[in-house]
């Protein structure tokens, strides 16, 4: 089992590295590059589904900090696999409740899943586009409480967050 978990950690971090290398193609003007990105994230999403079925949520105590973050990134980018995203959200929620996963990453995954379901996000982490040079978030459930809600999960205020994109 120890070998399996070590191999799993390597596999997850390799998947995240491939994700980072190709993420620039997500919104490429070249359809072939976009397709390659979608193919990669779909393959990773499928594999994460198998991993969750076998191990549950890959927590830091199971696979280490880096691989756990990689699993979160893969779930975050499984945008066309809502079943995988919802399952990851559910398992990660349990892990956060048990104190073995971070509420910050969970907040990002919750927002991402909500937006993919066509619903309003909670924490304002998902950016819809840029208007007049400023990033615009997807609609939020309680826009007036966004910074307060963000603070509860350790995310910087919205204005500081979007300043990084400008």
Image (cartoon, rainbow, N blue to C red):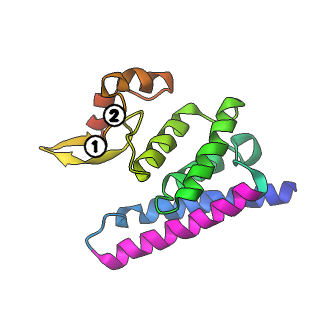
Tell me the chief SS of the magenta region.
Answer: helix
Q: What x and y, as percent, mark residue 120?
A: 37, 40
96, above or below 26, in the image: above
Residue at position x 59%, y 45% in the image: 89
Q: Is residue 42 visible?
A: yes
Q: Residue at x 43, y 69 (%)?
A: 37
Residue lying furthest left = 132
Residues shaded magenta: 30-53
Q: Is residue 166 visible?
A: no
- Number of labels in the image equals 2
Left/right of residue 26 with respect to residue 17 in the rendered view: left
83 with respect to 10 (left or right) = left
Residue pointed to by mark 2: 161
Q: Horizontal and vertical percent for residue 20?
A: 46, 59
Task: Look at the image and say whether residue 33 sits in the magenta stretch.
Answer: yes
> In this figure, which residue is indicated by the disc labeled 1?
165
């Amino acid at each position: 089992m120890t070998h399996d978990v070590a191999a799993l950690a390597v596999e997850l971090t390799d998947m995240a590295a491939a994700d980072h290398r190709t993420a620039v193609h997500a919104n490429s003007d070249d359809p072939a590059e976009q397709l390659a990105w979608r193919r990669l994230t779909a393959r990773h999403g499928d594999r994460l589904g198998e991993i969750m079925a076998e191990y549950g949520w890959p927590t830091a105590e199971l696979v280490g900090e880096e691989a756990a973050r990689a699993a979160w990134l893969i779930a975050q980018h499984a945008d066309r696999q809502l079943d995988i995203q919802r399952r990851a959200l559910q398992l990660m929620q349990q892990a956060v409740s048990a104190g073995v996963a971070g509420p910050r990453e969970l907040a990002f995954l919750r927002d991402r899943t909500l937006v993919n379901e066509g619903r309003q996000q909670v924490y304002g982490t998902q950016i819809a586009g840029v208007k007049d040079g400023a990033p615009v978030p997807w609609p939020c459930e309680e826009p007036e409480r966004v910074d307060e809600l963000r603070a509860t999960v350790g995310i910087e205020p919205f204005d500081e967050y979007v300043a990084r994109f400008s």
